[in-house]
Image (tube, grey):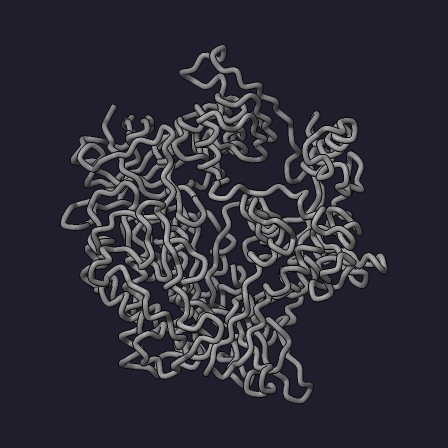
């Protein structure tokens, strides 16, 4: 989240899309109801009428997987209204704080251009990848600008051109949402673009789990920049994380492509630390012609953060031998994908010998679950660390297989539950909070930290004893000053970091150095633990110290970075430092003291109009050019603007262009047959239910929750049920090209057929929380989902696939 849960109450318009927040993120929805009580309007966009929908002022049904069309239509509506009614929008923000005015390379070709057939310029059909050279600014170092927004190659005009095809009629035909409903949503949400107003967009897995999930999110960010809703109270693009510490786990590099603090993983092409830094550190770009004339390009501090991370792991040796320390890190192979789907594809092909599965249950939660269960059987060994025996731990004796035919050695390590250990979690709003231990672990269960420490100590012992072990010093020289029972408080100090010359904790990431004299296990978490204040994650001060008490609660826990509660908050003020919204200020410039008041400012420099020439810092400090990116032709693999493509399995041909699917999406080839609409005519979509959590391992072992939700079910609309002769409570079979499940039919008004591409398209809703282990068993909905993923992240396309349903 760019903002945080409490800040939702400050919004005038709330758009919840790709999320059923009322059921799956109820604390966030507490603040939605608070905003409504203050006069806000709630808009909900979802294929299914959910409990969130029941509280919405406007409910807009769409076909699953059509967010880009829906939001593209909104951008077209906003741009046209800006032309007619510019006074209704904060045009100064758009011109000065976004890249709307910047001039793009004139050689860029768009999917709608003649001869492009739905593809951007630079596509290579042999490699299925883009050369992004034409996606850059016309001048890549000092891009020119046109603050009148009239130059045909400025971002604003290119945006207008690209989304001119996204008419209300075309969007309705793609999404199934009626034209009048589209107009109602667009008009209502665009009202948040007026100065002094704010709109927030809340999303979750319904947005991300598509072959173009990142581009779905990009549409939200683009709309928010057009409406001046980034960096302000009640604004932002706010991801609702699926579990209590998903934010913390990604911050600490659970994902395969990052190190702690979102630093890039080294590649086999990085011949030295300097080569790595040259590849990973973005060059500063300085736009010419904006009121602001300086980009902070905060990632230019990359070396400080990387060297301090190496020092945390290998100590003062980094000062004299940084390359040796760097080369101890594992490196990804060029062109190799290490994400979930690709990893299981490699397992299925016998390319991986062992897997340690920690707090995850891919035998239920992974896409194409039967294929992933089969892949587990190709391993030599599997370690599962969890609080119960999961389906993954029990895969070798699942229904339908002979355990004697599976050679995988399975080791189960019992883990402590969250209330059986202490430590920190970081919630969706980036608030890092300490949790204290309530009771001792049961039986032989141990906290994750203790298990980790025991393993590392044993590895160090084994590597010390074997002088021929490959990359031996990566382990033997690793600093691990913990015993078998580390104190999480000590780990929090290491994550914060030390000044090695004084032995004291560093006060912030601003104090980190690139010479190896400072350490930090994660630069973003510097300042969480200081000599003066101790462990700030334990802070529980209930006073709201923010300007006008807008709900920042800056002394309740701690928030990265630097306890800043709303990031990019320098975009919340005008060029003189005055808040766009005087009633709900995030920060404000005090001309008497010459300092910012309110939230921790996103850079302490003076306001643009009051700063010296050459020091007029633009507000989006993590971007190399200092402005918010409406045009995104820099890092994404599939285009600088989001473009409509169909899911890998779709009931219709792409209405927008001849290019059916995202051309650079990840398509698995291990046990991943493709389904066609003639055999599988309905759109399946997966989701959670309130009574069971994730794959159900915790909840399906609790009698009271099993009583509430005892068996697998699927939802279908009354109109489809009537066609198929299915009644409430009937046992049904839902099938896809990858397999079938059996479940109880829930016939509901929540789904209705919708006219898409001239066809009446029906959805079938499939929970994914059941499996063959635990107290309540049943088929997982992920037996039906395909092994395909987003072009940039490879997150699986769980949310839309083709299926059929029949009464058993």
In the rendering, at what x and y percent does residue 127 appear?
36, 45
In the rendering, at what x and y percent does residue 399 appear?
42, 17
Q: Left or right of 86: which side holds 95?
A: right
Q: Residue at x 57, y 32 (%)?
A: 357
Q: Is residue 185 visible in the rendered structure shown here? A: no
Closer to the camera in the image, 155 or 494: 155
Closer to the camera in the image, 18 or 716: 18
Residue 587 position (above or below residue 713): below
Which residue in the rendered view is the most extreme toward the right?
502
* Quarter where residue 553 is shown: bottom right
In the rendering, at what x and y percent does residue 621 appear?
56, 69
Closer to the camera in the image, 513 or 130: 130
Closer to the camera in the image, 552 or 299: 299
Q: Left or right of 776: which side holds 760?
A: left
Q: Is residue 789 visible in the rendered structure shown here? A: yes
In the rendering, at what x and y percent does residue 725 appear?
18, 31
Position of the C terminus, as image quadrant, is top left
Which residue in the rendered view is the most extreme toward the top?
404
Residue 242 position (above or below residue 351): below
Q: Residue at x 57, y 78 (%)?
A: 617
Q: Residue at x 76, y 33 (%)?
A: 460
């Amino acid at each position: 989240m760019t903002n945080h849960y409490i800040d939702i109450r400050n919004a005038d318009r709330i758009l919840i899309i790709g999320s059923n927040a009322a059921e799956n993120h109820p604390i966030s929805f507490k603040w939605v109801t608070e905003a409504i009580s203050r006069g806000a309007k709630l808009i909900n966009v979802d294929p299914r009428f959910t409990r969130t929908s029941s509280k919405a002022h406007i409910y807009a049904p769409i076909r699953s997987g059509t967010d880009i069309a829906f939001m593209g239509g909104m951008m077209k509506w906003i741009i046209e209204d800006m032309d007619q009614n510019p006074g209704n929008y904060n045009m100064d923000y758009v011109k000065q704080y976004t890249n709307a005015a910047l001039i793009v390379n004139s050689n860029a070709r768009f999917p709608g251009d003649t001869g492009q057939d739905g593809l951007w310029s630079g596509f290579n059909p042999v490699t299925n990848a883009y050369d992004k050279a034409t996606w850059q600014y016309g001048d890549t170092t000092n891009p020119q600008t046109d603050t009148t927004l009239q130059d045909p190659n400025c971002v604003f005009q290119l945006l207008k051109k690209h989304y001119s095809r996204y008419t209300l009629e075309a969007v309705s035909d793609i999404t199934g949402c009626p034209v009048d409903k589209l107009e109602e949503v667009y008009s209502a949400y665009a009202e948040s673009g007026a100065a002094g107003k704010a709109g927030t967009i809340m999303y979750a897995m319904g947005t991300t789990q598509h072959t173009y999930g990142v581009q779905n999110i990009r549409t939200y960010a683009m709309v928010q920049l057009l409406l001046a809703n980034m960096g302000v109270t009640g604004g932002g693009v706010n991801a609702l994380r699926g579990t209590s510490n998903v934010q913390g786990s990604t911050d600490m590099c659970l994902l395969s492509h990052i190190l702690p603090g979102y630093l890039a993983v080294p590649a086999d092409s990085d011949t030295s630390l300097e080569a790595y830094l040259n590849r990973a550190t973005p060059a500063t770009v300085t736009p010419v012609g904006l009121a602001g004339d300086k980009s902070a390009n905060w990632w230019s501090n990359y070396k400080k953060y990387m060297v301090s991370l190496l020092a945390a792991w290998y100590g003062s040796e980094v000062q004299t031998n940084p390359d040796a320390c760097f080369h101890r890190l594992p490196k990804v192979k060029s062109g190799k994908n290490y994400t979930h789907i690709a990893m299981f594809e490699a397992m299925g092909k016998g390319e991986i010998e062992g897997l340690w599965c920690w707090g995850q249950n891919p035998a239920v939660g992974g896409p194409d679950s039967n294929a992933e269960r089969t892949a587990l059987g190709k391993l030599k060994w599997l370690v599962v660390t969890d609080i119960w025996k999961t389906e993954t731990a029990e895969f070798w004796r699942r229904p339908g297989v002979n355990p004697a035919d599976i050679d995988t050695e399975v080791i189960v390590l019992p883990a402590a539950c969250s209330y059986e250990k202490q430590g920190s979690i970081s919630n969706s709003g980036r608030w890092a909070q300490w949790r204290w231990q309530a009771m001792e672990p049961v039986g032989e269960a141990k906290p994750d930290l203790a298990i980790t420490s025991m393993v590392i100590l044993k590895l160090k012992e084994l590597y010390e004893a074997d002088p021929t072990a490959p990359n031996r010093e990566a382990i033997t020289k690793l600093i691990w000053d913990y015993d078998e029972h580390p104190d999480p408080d000590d780990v929090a100090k290491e994550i914060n970091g030390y000044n090695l010359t004084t032995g004291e904790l560093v006060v912030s990431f601003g104090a980190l150095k690139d010479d190896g004299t400072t350490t930090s296990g994660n630069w973003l978490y510097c300042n969480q633990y200081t000599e003066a204040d101790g462990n700030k994650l334990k802070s529980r001060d209930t006073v709201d110290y923010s300007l006008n008490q807008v709900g920042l609660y800056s002394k309740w826990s701690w928030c990265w970075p630097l306890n800043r509660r709303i990031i990019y908050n320098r975009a919340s003020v005008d060029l003189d430092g005055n808040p766009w919204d005087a009633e709900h200020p995030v920060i404000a410039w005090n001309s008497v003291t010459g300092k910012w008041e309110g939230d921790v400012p996103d850079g302490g420099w003076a306001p643009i109009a009051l700063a010296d020439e050459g020091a007029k810092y633009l507000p989006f400090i993590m971007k190399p050019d200092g402005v918010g990116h409406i045009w995104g032709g820099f890092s994404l693999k599939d285009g600088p603007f989001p473009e409509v493509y169909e899911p890998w399995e779709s009931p219709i041909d792409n209405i927008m262009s001849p290019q059916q699917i995202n051309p650079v999406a990840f398509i698995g080839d291990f046990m991943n047959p493709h389904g066609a609409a003639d055999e599988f005519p309905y759109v399946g979509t997966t989701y959670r239910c309130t009574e069971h959590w994730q794959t159900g391992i915790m909840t399906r072992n609790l009698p009271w929750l099993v009583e509430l939700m005892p068996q697998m079910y699927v939802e279908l609309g009354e109109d489809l049920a009537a066609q198929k002769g299915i009644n409430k409570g009937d046992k049904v079979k839902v099938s896809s090209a990858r397999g079938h499940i059996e479940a109880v039919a829930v016939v509901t008004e929540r789904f209705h057929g919708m006219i898409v591409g001239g066809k009446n398209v029906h959805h079938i809703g499939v929970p994914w929380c059941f499996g063959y282990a635990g107290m309540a068993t049943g088929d997982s909905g992920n037996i039906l989902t395909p092994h395909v993923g987003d072009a940039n992240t490879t997150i699986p396309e769980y949310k839309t696939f083709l299926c059929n349903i029949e009464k058993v």
